[in-house]
Every structure is written in structure tokens, then in C-alpha cells.
Amino acid sequence: MGKVKTSLLSREQIIELLRKHLPEWRSKYGLQRIAIFGSFARGTATQDSDVDLLVEFSRPVGLEFIDVWNEVERLLGRKVDMITVETLRRGRANPRKKHIAESIEREMIYVD
């Protein structure tokens, strides 16, 4: 059974919710920064849109990445796609993925 989506949150509501929880996630997981990108950042999200996030940690993470992901999905009430800063850097260095990384960088809106 799929996740029930709540009413469509605005970009500002998403940023405010993430901003409110960031201090807790910093101490709990070492999460330093969060940025939104994609349709919510562009203001073109629909009821079926997921929330695209770029995350940066202050320390190496393992399963904590999944814990953060789950907490954010519960908080926002919808599917979240999350990538790390390291993934973005690798994408920028790959000629076949460079345009995707550049698009993400243009759209990013940092929460903090």
C-alpha cells in the first residue's frame, strides 16, 4: 500500500519545517545542511511530486542516512529523494552526469 500524501505543502512551508528540525538532526545525526531542489524549489510541484533534498553531514554516515530520510518523509508526509553533497560532487566530475549536477546546483535553496 502506497504512502498517503497530505495536502500540497508550499516551498516556504517545507523550508520552515526542515529549518525547525535541523538543530535536532545536527546533534542527533551530524546533519550540517539541507537544501531543496527540483519541483518544490522551482514552484512547479504537483500533488504527485516528491521532495528532492541535498544533505551534507559533518561526519561519515551509514545507516543514519536512512534514519534522516525516514524522519523527513514522516515530517513532510510525502516521498523524499535525498542525495549527499558527495554524490553531487561525483556527478559534477562525471561528463555524462555533469549537466544534472549543474541543474541541481542552480535550483538549490538552502534551509539554514
Image (cartoon, grey):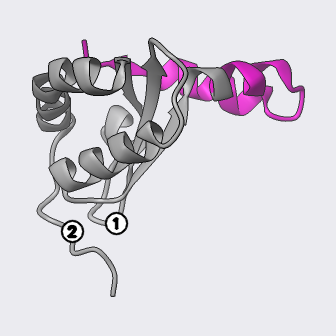
> Magenta residues?
88-112
* Residue at x-position 54% and y-position 36%: 62
Location of mark 1 (residue): 48
- Whichever of labels 1 and 2 marks the residue nearer the N terminus, that label is 2
Q: Which amino acid is tagged 1?
A: Asp
Q: Which amino acid is tagged 2?
A: Lys
* Residue at x-position 21% and y-position 23%: 22
Image quadrant where residue 26 sits: top left
Image quadrant where residue 109 sits: top left
Q: What element carries label 2?
A: loop
Q: Do the residues labelled 1 and 2 touch (CB within 8 Å)?
A: yes
State the residue lying farthest toward the right.
95
Q: Does the magenta stretch include residue 33?
A: no
Q: Is mark 1 on a helix, strand or loop?
A: loop
Location of mark 2 (residue): 5
The image shows residue 4 at horizontal and vertical percentages of 21, 75
**Position of 79 relative to 2 (above/below):** above
* Residue at x-position 17% and y-position 56%: 8
Q: How crowded is mark 1: few (under 14 residues within 10 Å), some or many (20 or more)?
A: few
The quadrant of the rendering that contains the N terminus is bottom left
Q: Does the magenta stretch include residue 89?
A: yes
The image shows residue 16 at horizontal and vertical percentages of 11, 28
The image shows residue 63 at horizontal and vertical percentages of 48, 43
In this view, the residue in front, 61 or 38, is: 61
The image shows residue 64 at horizontal and vertical percentages of 42, 38
The quadrant of the rendering that contains the C terminus is top left
Mainly helix, strand or loop, the magenta region? helix
**Position of 90 relative to 73 (above/below):** above
